[in-house]
Image (spheres, grey):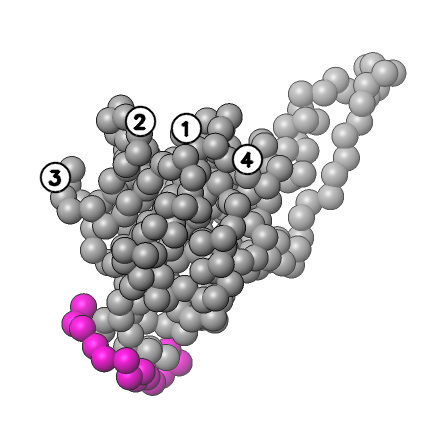
Amino acid sequence: MSLFAVLALLVAAPVAGDDPDAIIVTGTPVTREEAKKRAAEYVRRAGIAQLKPLARWVDPVCPRTVGVSDMVAGIVNARVRTVATAAGAPVAPADCQANIVIAFSADGRSLARAVRRKAPDQFAELAPVARDRVLDGTSAIRWWYTTRDESRDGMPISDFYVKLYNSSIVSTQVVRALQTATVVIDVEQADGMPLDSVAAYAAMVALAEFRSNPPPPKESILALFDGETERRELSSHDAALLRGIYTVPPDREAYQQRRQLVTTVRKSGE
């Protein structure tokens, strides 16, 4: 319980001396070190900037939702745009070419396998464990990305990796940019969940390169389908992480980005 919550309860409660049956609430504020540990664990389990620098949108995001009515698609698309704007991601006008596809399907696994047969390059960047999750897993929501490397100035580059040392700052001179994001929602698995919650989950994983191998943090909407039934909207940690992803310098090593993200998430709880 945060110190603010403890104070709120104390203010609302009767004074103990006036009421012998009063409940006295006590609490211990979370220390800075404990808050840092929690933030680090959250970022680790979110799977951002772990093995390689994070990938985020450089091109304006343009979501398109398929497999549902136009009304539902409009709600989902609007949610993605709202979350993207709040995060600081670039957002395209309504009349744009989709680079985020959110597909509702009666059988998410079969749809993912069909996509792989028709467009195997879509799965080329997935690690074996992630590929198995997408193609053989039973999750209600599965996702994958394609990315590209470019220079800090937005110029295409080859696969070589160059570092520029400038005082205490190390620039990789390489920016990892998302090209496409595909999110598949299994309607059978997601049955009973509020549409806005599902749309918020889809928006979060569409806006950055989230690995789904670690168990999702319980303080996140990513735990929506893991028994955390009260987590039905983006948490303060989620919102802070997304803002951090679009704030940290993109041309840094993963550990540098991760450290800054941990700081951003920690501050969101203060």
Going from N to C along the chain, the mark reached first, 4 or 1, is 1
Q: Which mark is residue 195?
A: 1
Numbered range of the magenta stretch:
152-169
Q: Residue furthest right?
A: 20
Q: Secondary structure at mark 1?
A: helix
Amino acid of disc 4: Arg
Q: Dot 1: few (<14), some (14–19), or many (≥20) neighbours within 10 Å?
A: some
Q: Mark 2 sits on what residue?
A: 72
Q: Looking at the image, which residue is at 55% across and 42% down?
A: 223
Disc 4, disc 1: CB below 8 Å? no
Query: How far from the left and from the top, in percent, is residue 44?
Result: 55, 60
Q: Secondary structure at mark 3?
A: loop
Q: Mark 3 sits on what residue?
A: 95
Disc 2, disc 1: CB below 8 Å? yes
Q: CA distance from mark 1 to mark 3?
A: 24 Å
Rendered view: 134 above or below 120: above
Q: Secondary structure at mark 2?
A: helix
Q: Is residue 10 left or right of residue 142?
A: right
Of residues 157 and 168, the one nearer the viewer is 157
Amino acid of disc 1: Leu
Q: Looking at the image, which residue is at 42% across and 71% down?
A: 52
Q: Is residue 112 left or right of residue 158?
A: right
Going from N to C along the chain, the mark reached first, 2 or 3, is 2
User: Of the residues tagged 4 and 3, which is closer to the observer?
Assistant: 3
Q: Secondary structure at mark 4?
A: loop
Magenta span: chief secondary structure: loop
Q: CA distance from mark 2 to mark 1?
A: 8 Å
Q: CA distance from mark 4 to mark 3?
A: 33 Å
Q: Which mark is residue 231?
A: 4
